[in-house]
Amino acid sequence: MNTNSMTEWAKSYSWKLIRNQAYGKYRGYYFTVFDTSNIRLVLTALPSLTESESVDIYRAIEENKEGLRIVEHGIFKSCGNLLRVSFTEATMKAMTQEDIGSFFDQITDLLSQLGISATDNCFICSSDFGTQETLFDNILVPLCGTCYDHLEQEYIKAEQEFSSEEKKYGLGFIGALLGGLLATIPWILLSYHGWYVGIIGFLIMFLSLKGYKLLGARIGILTPWIVGGLTIFLIVLAELVANLLQVSAALKEVFDISPSLGQTFGVFIELLKDSTTGILRGVIINLLIGIVIGLAGTISLFKDMKLNINKQVDAYRVARA
Ligand SMILES: [Zn+2]
């Protein structure tokens, strides 16, 4: 089932296509095809199944595994039941449109011979009127009117938030600063005692993002700049504070004086310049690891979030189409 065969086949049955996903109805059953790069999945929503029906399906597919060309299959419960079937990449590549048609024929034959209907119940609440169809967690399912309306409200909210111009960046900045500051405490304490603390860069980024969201700011194009920028700033600040505390404590102990901030800073700079102390090396290692981890985290979390929002909004658009 190379991507093209699957896409062409899906189009010929008026299935919908979003990114690397295809879904639609075939002989009354609801199918969603995930065409990811490694394992490719076909999911069928079967809202209500008894324990013995699940066993029957499993057994029947197991017996026809070769003809169906599948490697793995199983039934799992989301709200209703989902039948999941996966292929190897090689199989998928080799499948023509005819092969795909034959697969869907076989799998639907198998289900209908077992007397299992796909459409008579709501996937979420199992009521008897599963008449609307929509994407739920990216899977095409039948829903009753009540559950459909409820879900639609959520999608509308997601889209409004997504497209809203009002991001409240100022509030987000304050939240991110407070959250990130909290995470500098373990950095300062551990670095003060001479530990390598770069990994805490992730915590600073994470709490900064948490703080951003906690104050009710929305995710927008500036969010990663705010969170990423504050993460770098707070890492540098935390490392500086830890080192100044260390120097100050040393001065107190050795010379029995309470140095001013200016004096402490001056001594710290001298120590940094003196390569025999190894202080510069420690500071650089902490900063480099912290910043790299913090920024990598910012980028990956933000990507995930944006993807999730996009998915929700896509689903909403499909539901409305
Ligand atoms: Zn329902």
Image (cartoon, rainbow, N blue to C red):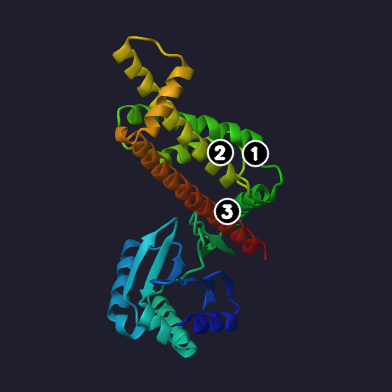
Which of these two is toward me, 58 or 172? 172
Dot 3 falls on a residue whose secondary structure is helix
Q: Earlier in the sequence, mark 3 or mark 2?
A: 2
Q: Is mark 3 within 8 Å of ligand 1?
A: no
Q: CA distance from mark 1 to mark 3?
A: 18 Å
For the question of whether residue 26 can be seen, the reply is yes
- The quarter of the rendered structure image containing the N terminus is bottom left
Badge 1 vs badge 3, beta-carbon distance below 8 Å: no
Q: Amino acid at mark 3?
A: Ile
For the question of whether residue 185 can be seen, the reply is no
The image shows residue 226, relative to residue 114, as above or below, that is above
List the residue tagged with mark 3. Answer: 309
Q: Amino acid at mark 2?
A: Lys
Percent position of residue 88, x then y: 35, 77
Q: CA distance from mark 3 to mark 2?
A: 14 Å
Q: What residue is rendered at 34% in x and 37% in y?
A: 282
Percent position of residue 113, x then y: 39, 79
- Mark 2: give few (<14), some (14-19) or many (20+) Cα within 10 Å: some
List the residue tagged with mark 2. Answer: 213
Q: Earlier in the sequence, mark 1 or mark 3?
A: 1
List the residue tagged with mark 1. Answer: 169
Q: Earlier in the sequence, mark 2 or mark 1?
A: 1
- The quarter of the rendered structure image containing the C terminus is bottom right
Which of these two is toward me, 283 or 22? 283
Percent position of residue 171, x then y: 63, 33
Q: Amino acid at mark 1?
A: Tyr
Q: What residue is rendered at 56% in x and 38% in y?
A: 213
